[in-house]
Amino acid sequence: MPELRKDPVVERWVIIATERARRPTDFAPEVIPLRGPDLCPFCPGHEDRTPPEVFRSGGSEDGPWTVRVVPNKFPALHADGEVHAAGEGVYDRIDGVGAHEVIIESPDHFAGLGTLSVAHVGEVLAAYRERLLALRKDPRLEYVLIFKNHGVAAGASLGHPHSQLIATPILPELVTEELQGAVRYFRMKERCVWCDIVRQERRDGARLVLDDEGFVAVSPYASRFPYEMWILPIAHRPSFESLLPDEVDALARLLRELVARLGRLFADPPYNFALHTAPLRGTEPEHFHWHLELMPKLTRVAGFELGTGFFINPTPPEDAARFLRLADTPPGVVRP
Amino acid sequence: MPELRKDPVVERWVIIATERARRPTDFAPEVIPLRGPDLCPFCPGHEDRTPPEVFRSGGSEDGPWTVRVVPNKFPALHADGEVHAAGEGVYDRIDGVGAHEVIIESPDHFAGLGTLSVAHVGEVLAAYRERLLALRKDPRLEYVLIFKNHGVAAGASLGHPHSQLIATPILPELVTEELQGAVRYFRMKERCVWCDIVRQERRDGARLVLDDEGFVAVSPYASRFPYEMWILPIAHRPSFESLLPDEVDALARLLRELVARLGRLFADPPYNFALHTAPLRGTEPEHFHWHLELMPKLTRVAGFELGTGFFINPTPPEDAARFLRLADTPPGVVRP
């Protein structure tokens, strides 16, 4: 019997359609080749093809680097100007002021978060933190969205490993909904809803993928997508940028392992992730618990879901978690 | 300068990124061939490959038909059973009771809503109305979603022209948000927000695509997707199923023309549409105004949007509306 499940934070209903595809081999994600390194603007030696960098990790100013952050050459939002609001009858708009940056994750065109060293993935996460701390100082901004599109089917237009950052003068809708849901829950129970989710998942185990060094990875109860995973700190932490150096390392190990497991199950599938962290200002610390939502792109359906806010997921999250637990590093392979 | 625009009903913000692709020729939507008629379960002569039909239009019981409605062979929700709700710690779920039907739009495997006769498209719309009226009688159901996935990239798995219907025991999230927004607006202004949108768009004209025989097609102010269009009745009508016979004809002419124009601009692009109609029960008639949201699938990005509720649209709706107005029937071609 299929089930309708409700996300406890944003109250989004999902159909878990148990009679459709569910095993990893039932999916054949689309892998489309992207341009090679020759013309790649993110490869070493091509640094002049991007706008000047705003952050670099490793090496001297002109020497080799491990991670670079540069403004997007075709930004969705502009860095200059004031935030003017205007109305037009029933409609509202504001000027598109903000920031749109690219986090180039490695000099290696063919690298990926599942194959880079743990220390290197840590440098990527540290770059996220640095940019969050820097952009927080801009009073025009309300939110910083950090996300990754990997693979053409997930929206990437360049093959070189990179993630993106969009800083906005307003709160994205899903963050607003999460905040409203968390505040509602807190008023009722005097507890953080994500802390309760982490506690229940660690006790129950059926949707737990990994639980290590202060972080958990779970298949969410009302997963919208097959093999969707959320990473959460076990301790209550509103903001990603509060991450301590040794936590960066533990989180890097976990994220790298999850991407590697997806790669073992689906042969480098397209995927997206989005970091959900507390708004830059005005939120009580007890009302948000940062988490990272990792969404493999294994199915094509999207229009219906986008049009209705209603998701149909053919893989029960308990099945996904079981396969993801089984996709552990093969014996004999030493993890760095 | 890019703009951030807010949908006046659901308060969803969209980035209108004016410096990216905007002309029809900037898009190359993906067209992937699907299985031909030989093995098609929806072609005439293969009627025994679907579950028994629940509605048919045209012809006698065993003779030729024009439109058939059959239960989905692999339903996302089941027709039998009671709606049991259950909790599990912080989580809620209910049994997946409902209906999942397929509206087979034509016996012709290669037909489409842009090439069928106006009368035939009207029969498809009349089938939607009949199923809405029939399913309304089932007290377990709260909502009937009617939608179409056309083309592989929009989620279709069969090439034969068809739309789908999913009846649910709960309200989809986006309908809930629309209702909340409409009620908020009504309390403030004592008017329907969609009536105000229609009035403003007809007066302003910049986003108006067609205005004919009681219906308008507009490029919505905060369009999420390039060339997105909404169809609305000009008069206030909460429910699609209240459509009168002569309105069916006018709506069929408009829908057919819009799909044909998309075909002229983009060569049979993948698209989705979703009918937003009032919930089956409990809604005040002044709080909803049915509309159909038509979303061409011209770009691939979806994961970021799904993960954050934040959309980036490279085509200002005013540009889309201009190109759609110009894509009128070529001179010399007589419209049926």
Image (cartoon, coloured by chain):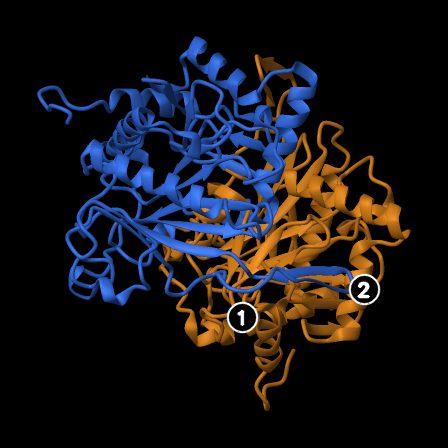
Chain colours: A blue, B orange
Decide which of tag 2 and tag 1 comes sooner along the chain: 2
Residue found 26% across the figure and 46% down from its top: A105
Q: Which chain carries label 2?
A: B
Alpha carbon of mark 2 to alpha carbon of mark 1: how far?
23 Å
Residue B35 picture quarter: bottom left
The answer to whether mark 2 and mark 1 are in CB contact below 8 A is no
Q: What residue type is labelled 1?
A: Leu
Please indicate whether residue B268 sits to the left or right of residue B237 in the image: left
Vertical relation: A76 (above or below) B204? above
Q: Where is residue A126 shown, x and y percent of the image?
A: 32, 38
Q: What element carries label 1?
A: helix
Q: Which residue is the site of mark 1?
A: B262
Indicate the position of residue B336 as horizontal and vertical percent values.
65, 78
Instruction: Inspect this view and state whether residue B159 appears.
Output: no
Which residue is tagged 2? B234
Give the side of residue A29 with respect to residue B248, left or right.
left
Relative horizontal placement of residue B168, taking residue B236 as reference (left or right)? left
The type of residue carrying mark 2 is Ile
Relative to B223, is B76 above or below?
A: above
| Name of the residue lying farthest toward the right | B190
